[in-house]
Image (tube, rainbow, N blue to C red):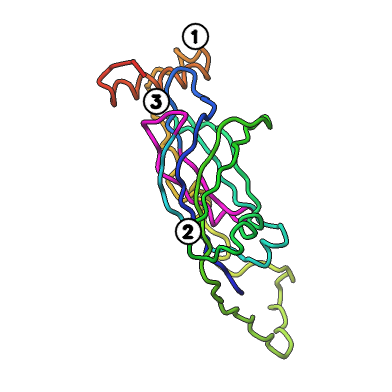
Amino acid sequence: MELTPLELYLHCAKDLKNVNLFTKMTVYAVVSVSGDRHTAQKSPVDKQCGACPNWNYAMMMAIDEAIARRDHHNLVIRLKSDRMFGDKEIGTVQVPIRDLLDHNEGNGKVEYQNVSYSVRLPNGKTKGVLNFSYKFGDTFTIPTVSPPPPISGHPPPPSQGMAEYAYPPPGGYPPYGYQQGPAANNGYGYPPVQKWKKGMGTGIVGGLLGGMLIGDMVDGAYKAGVEDGLDYAF
């Protein structure tokens, strides 16, 4: 299998939609190749710039150029607001990797190409611009491993007195409640949000003001109290 390195340099975004009601957004990006969750990579969270975040963060992934040129792969960049009670989707940029390859032709694979794309909101409209640079490296080959040949002969007869069912071997099932590696995380390679313990008192407040308002108000109060010394001016 032949793969081509794709190097990304995520610069910044401008004029994003503010999905927080009372607080300044803290924005990060999740970058992946469509159809392959194993390629997902997360940028740092910008806690200062609100709707105009700056990351200047480098990423690298490998793509199958032959498949990408058949327009089967997109570069997907999802922008999110980091929040205490659940992150909020801001918008998405999807770029056919074939377009990046075509734009790069004639320029070699050495220099970074600077591009800008509009951010598409969940409702289909556009708001804001994402800026990043990219370049492709030299294609390399990964050897494929052939499956072992089938063993000749006939399978042994089933044991006497046992039903002929295709049970898995002993230990074939994981113990109850067991979660294997990638399934135990949230798909982006970082730990899941910690569950809150009882006694926080959010139940009574939530009944008075509503879940959505509480998320932003408590989030704002918490961040302002901890990060700004109880200064609520954002």
Residue 209 location in percent, x, y?
A: 50, 11
Chain-order first, disc 2 or disc 3: 2
Front position in the image: 92 or 102: 102
In the rendered image of this protein, does residue 86 appear above or below residue 148? above
Mark 3 crowdedness (10 Å alpha carbons): few <14, some 14-19, many ≥20: few
Which residue in the structure is indicated by mark 2? 60
Picture residue at 45% right of the left edge, 35% below the top? 27
Q: Amino acid at mark 1?
A: Leu
Q: Evaluate if marks 1 and 3 touch, with contact meaning CB atoms under 8 Å apart.
A: no
Q: Report the residue that reaches farthest toward the left.
A: 229
Front position in the image: 83 or 28: 28
29 left or right of 152?
left
Which residue in the structure is indicated by mark 3? 198
- How many circles with numbers are drawn on the protein? 3
Magenta-tinted stretch: 28-52
Q: Secondary structure at mark 1?
A: helix
Residue 221 location in percent, x, y?
A: 36, 18
Q: Amino acid at mark 3?
A: Lys
Chain-order first, disc 1 or disc 2: 2
**Where is the N terminus found, in terms of image quarters?**
bottom right
Picture residue at 50% right of the left edge, 16% below the top? 213
Chain-order first, disc 1 or disc 3: 3
Residue 178 shows in the view: no
Q: Amino acid at mark 2?
A: Met
Separation (CA) of disc 1 from disc 3: 18 Å
Q: Nearer the viewer, mark 2 or mark 3?
A: 2
Q: Nearer the viewer, mark 1 or mark 3?
A: 1
Which residue in the structure is indicated by mark 1? 208
Separation (CA) of disc 1 from disc 2: 47 Å
